[in-house]
Image (tube, rainbow, N blue to C red):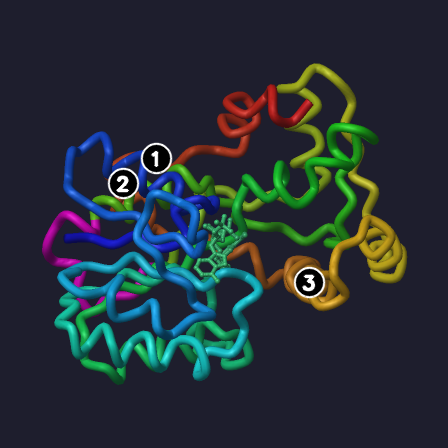
Amino acid sequence: MILITGATGNVGREVVNELRKSETPFKIASHRKDSEYVYFDFENADSFRPALTGVKKLFLLRPPHIADAKKYFQPLIDIAKEVGVEHIVFLSLLGVEKNPIVPHHKIEKIIKKSGIPYTFLRPSFFMQNLISQHGEELRKEKEIYVPAGKGKTSFIDVRDIGTVTARILTENGHENKGYSLTGTEALDYYEVAEILSEELGETIKYVNPSVLQFRDKMLKKGIKKEFVTVMIGIYFTAKIGLAKKITPDLQILLGKRPITFKEFAHDYKYELV
Ligand SMILES: NC(=O)c1ccc[n+]([C@@H]2O[C@H](COP(=O)([O-])OP(=O)(O)OC[C@H]3O[C@@H](n4cnc5c(N)ncnc54)[C@H](OP(=O)(O)O)[C@@H]3O)[C@@H](O)[C@H]2O)c1
């Protein structure tokens, strides 16, 4: 049995879509008590054992607000080990091996130490963030408002992550491996705005605000201070050229060319305008 956490999120949704196509049996975990799914809450350790009992493969992610790896993930992985989980596929982060500050680094260590076979998926920045995190500016103001300068990002489409995750959960041979997943092109936000303008048929402008302007606008929108700080860190990383790395792993796992930004803009046209 496979258990999917974060099934309503960007990646989990696509993993579920792919597994449904393959007719593989799986269960969805949810922290919403009123849902029809298996009750599982990262913030309620009592939910771990009942949810994991009988599970052989676990798709695990870290919801963005769960930052303390030791507090939340150590007990979870201990119970996974006790109940006999045989494979954990963890949604991590590109470059995590060299970045001990991010929680994903610590979570990978906890999983490795447990001895449970694992696969670490380390994706780059999601194309779909343009819809979720920045969709409001895009739709209302026709702007991309991120402080990333001219830095390039090797964007990935979450549909490709869903495809490879489902494959890894249903095939053998991916145990104890880490995959760095990126698209095949690195784009700066001026190029992103140009592609969006072409596909959407209206002018989209990349504003390239300063960090302070960005911070003020996000706080005014009601985004929590901590999350704004995380976003500033992410766009600073892009600005200084640390998000442009392109790797072959995704193409190898997919067996075909990953989805391009142009294809993403085309497919999601009605969510972007
Ligand atoms: N965005 C990017 O560009 C990017 C790139 C690389 C890696 N990542 C990593 O990807 C992860 C996020 O993945 P995502 O974007 O697919 O997720 P997401 O869209 O942020 O969704 C979070 C999921 O976690 C669930 N959740 C929230 N609180 C929970 C709790 N207490 N217990 C159990 N489940 C809970 C949510 O359920 P409800 O919907 O029911 O609340 C939802 O399904 C993060 O670790 C992030 O660092 C992101």
Distance from the alpha carbon under mark 3 to that under mark 1: 33 Å
Residue at the extreme front? 34
Three-letter code, disc 3: Phe
Tell me, yes or no, whether the highlighted magenta stretch contains residue 178: yes
Please state the extent of the stretch shown in magenta in the rendering: 168-179
Secondary structure at numbered mark 1: loop
Secondary structure at numbered mark 3: helix
In the image, which disc is placed on residue 149? none
Q: Are marks 2 and 1 in contact (CB under 8 Å)?
A: yes
Three-letter code, disc 1: Arg
3 or 2: tag closer to the N-terminus: 3
- Which residue is under mark 1? 257
- Which residue is under mark 2? 254
Tell me, yes or no, whether the highlighted magenta stretch contains residue 205: no
The x and y percentages for residue 210 are 86, 57
Q: Residue at x 27, y 40 (%)?
A: 254
Image quadrant in which the C terminus is located: top right
- Which residue is under mark 3? 227
Q: Give whichever of 247, 115 is nearer the camera.
A: 115
The x and y percentages for residue 94 are 46, 62
3 or 1: tag closer to the N-terminus: 3
Three-letter code, disc 2: Leu
Q: Residue at x 83, y 57 (%)?
A: 219
Distance from the alpha carbon under mark 3 to that under mark 2: 32 Å
Is 55 positioned to the left or the right of 122 in the image?
Answer: left
**Which is more foreground, mark 2 or mark 1?**
2
Secondary structure at numbered mark 2: helix
